[in-house]
Image (spheres, rainbow, N blue to C red):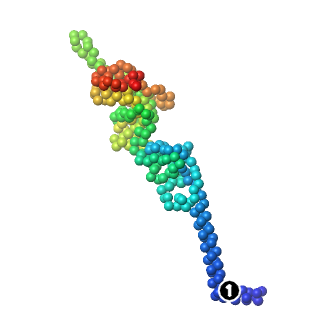
Amino acid sequence: MGNLLVPLKKFLSNKNTITILGVLLGIVVLYFGYNWRVNKSISPVQVPYCTTTLVSGTKITEDVIGYTEVPASMTKNMTNLLTNVNQIRDQLVSYDSKIPQNGFFFVENLISEDEMPDSVFSNIKDGYTIYSLEVDNHSTYGNSIFPDDSIDLYLKTEYEEEVSDGEDEKLLVFGRFIKSIQVLAVKDGDGGNVFQNKDNPTEPAELLFAVPEDLFLLLKKAEYLGGFDIIPVPRNANYSEHAGSTEVEADILREMIIEKTFIIPGECTDLTQCD
């Protein structure tokens, strides 16, 4: 056995042999390393894409996310490309962005719902506008009115009625003015969402509603006239769950406001008379 090892030792001790073996080893390493890098660069990776055009403020849900495979080399330098669907789902399209159909999702195009400035405005119906009702902690029943609640708006004012001997008597007027109106958002004095931190809500300053033109005009006229107090009144969960149509409850309250204002020709103060 020892005799067999002598030629092997001589062969390995030869400098030329060592050089040749080193070169061959280097070629093998380069070959496999090159193939590994090539395979890695051309191996497909799964990338989410948008199946439809999304505009600013749109919430990204699973049904608008598709998946495609692209070579890894294409995404190597795209550090802002989002490939993890968990970073995409339930985000909003940023207020200054638009994602085209079949487009990829990039970091700068998405924003969280809490970061979106006034995202509630993007979801109102055509022909509707925002009405803001000034409130405080007391008028919201200890901050107990929440977004998506359906509530009622009551109206408080005074009415002068002529009595005997030409004297006028002031009578209290108080009744349900608008029924089943949905709260769009509850904002604090800085314009932030009151319930952004559910464990530590801020002080409410305004309730936002999306209303048609006739209700917007009535509410703003009552506000500008003075002497009319609009009071939010919450209901129970069943009232919100089975909310009826939003409409003026008492026409006499509508007329009390209209009688004290100048009616612009063509003005819409009654939805049944609007074009």
Q: Where is residue 177 in the image (x, y as percent from the top left)?
A: 38, 24
Q: Mark 1 points at which residue?
A: 12
Is 47 placed above or below 149 here? below
The kind of residue on which mark 1 rests is: Leu
Horizontal arrangement in the rendering, residue 164 relative to residue 216 (left or right)? left
Report whether residue 268 is seen: yes
Q: Which of 220 and 25 is in front in this view?
A: 25
Residue 21 x %, y %: 65, 81
Residue 45 placement: quadrant: bottom right
Q: Residue at x 40, y 25 (%)?
A: 275
State the residue lying farthest toward the top: 164
Residue at point 64%, 87% (across, down)? 16
Q: Which of 240 and 65 is in front in this view?
A: 65
Residue at 22 percent of width and 14 percent of height: 167
Q: In this rendering, would 66 be left or right of 208?
A: right
Question: How many numbered discs sit on the rendered protein?
Answer: 1
Q: In the image, residue 114 lies at what x, y percent?
A: 43, 45
Residue at 44% in and 52% down: 108
